[in-house]
Amino acid sequence: MRVATSTAYSQGVSSMNTQNFKLNKTLMQLSTGKRIVTPSDDPAGAAKVLGLNQAKSRTEQFQKNIDTLKSSLQIEETALSGIVDTLQRVRELSIQANNDTYDAAQRAAIGLEVQEHFEAIAGFANTTNGNGEFLFGGFSNRDVPFENVAGVINYNGDQGQQFLQISATRQVASGDNGFDTFMNVRGSFNGDTLTPSGATPPMSVFAIVKELEVAMSTNAGVTPPNTVQETFHETMSRTIGNIDIALGKIADAQSAIGSRLNAIESQENVNEDYMVQLSSTLSDTQDLDYTEAISRLEQQQIGLQASQQTFTKIQGLSLFNFI
């Protein structure tokens, strides 16, 4: 069969292009360190790599959420610890002031210190995290949750609680709203009549401390024995009891924070182990075997050189060269 000169040229060029394509593909694999450069290299493997990368990306985001949670909860724990220390000092002052040996000047001085502690507790309650978000504002974490209006603390937040995802099936609260933590101290008693349901109207942590401050100024000069002094002692006893209830409520919040920190630390370790497994599987699926690739590269270089040399000789096989 006669082969036309154009056909020989075409086959030669096609052979060189094929060898050059294979060589470039191997060079790309070597430069990237990946066996699968395009999905066509291994469709099943490419789909597996895509799924593994997505799982890895999600887990990395879970780990970032855990870091955010740790920071937020640790800051909240510090704020609550500050409030506990302050309330314990206020309790000590309450016990001191309830002693009949204290005179008006001493009780007035205690009242001034209690006022400072009142402001300190409000400051702790308005603590922000590293992003400038108020920890105890609920969902309204961009607005100041506690506002002092003429000595009365108003809560401007809501009763929401934000959660962050730490695994595909697990969420953890990143904080506690101020209403549940400070404004709704169940079991406290302000001396008023009971509600129609027979329950005692709850007080806030701030109102409990404020009641002590007011008692120090309005009853500072009373001397026993008289009805006013008895009322004063009743107020002090009630205030001490309310402080104990408030301390218990905040201790519960601290305990919940500790449980969350333990939970996220455990999940963080699980996520780290999962990331190691993902990376190992990803490496087995897409990483290049350099020894095999370099050997293949040398063979392809030889193949390309052979194609080029063959094409050069074919160029000389024309009858016109002999006319």
Image (cartoon, helix red, strand yellow):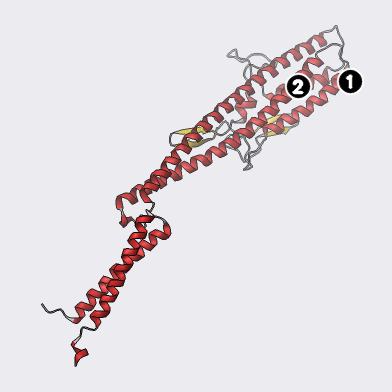
Q: Which mark is residue 105?
A: 1
**Sequence-first tag of 1 and 2:** 2
Q: Amino acid at mark 2?
A: Val
Q: Is residue 76 visible?
A: yes
Q: Circle 1 sits in a helix, a strand or a loop, which is it?
A: helix
Q: Residue furthest bottom?
A: 323
Crowd band around label 2 with a 10 angstrom C-alpha radius: few (<14), some (14–19), many (20+)? many
> What is the CA distance from the residue labelled 1 to the residue labelled 2?
18 Å
Q: Quadrant of residue 160?
A: top right
205, above or below 53, in the image = above
* Residue at x-position 64% and y-position 18%: 201
- Whether tag 1 and tag 2 are in contact, CB under 8 A, the answer is no
Q: Position of residue 248 (x, y in %)?
A: 64, 19
Pointer 2 residue: 90
Q: On the picture, is 14 further left or further right than 224?
A: left
Asked whether the viewer can see residue 211, the reply is: no
Figure quadrant of residue 104? top right
Amino acid type at mark 1: Ala
Which residue sits at x=60%, y=38%?
141
Q: Is residue 224 left or right of residue 190?
A: right
Give the quarter of the figure containing the N terminus: bottom left
- Choose top left, top right, bottom left or bottom right for residue 168: top left
Front residue (pair 68, 113): 68
Q: Nearer the viewer, residue 184 or 196?
A: 184
| Placement of the C terminus among the 4 image quadrants | bottom left
Circle 1 packing at 10 Å, graded few (<14), some (14-19), many (20+), is few
Secondary structure at numbered mark 2: helix
Along the line of sight, which residue is nearer the eye, 202 or 134? 134
Q: Which residue lies at the image location 49% right of the left edge and 36% below the top edge?
A: 166
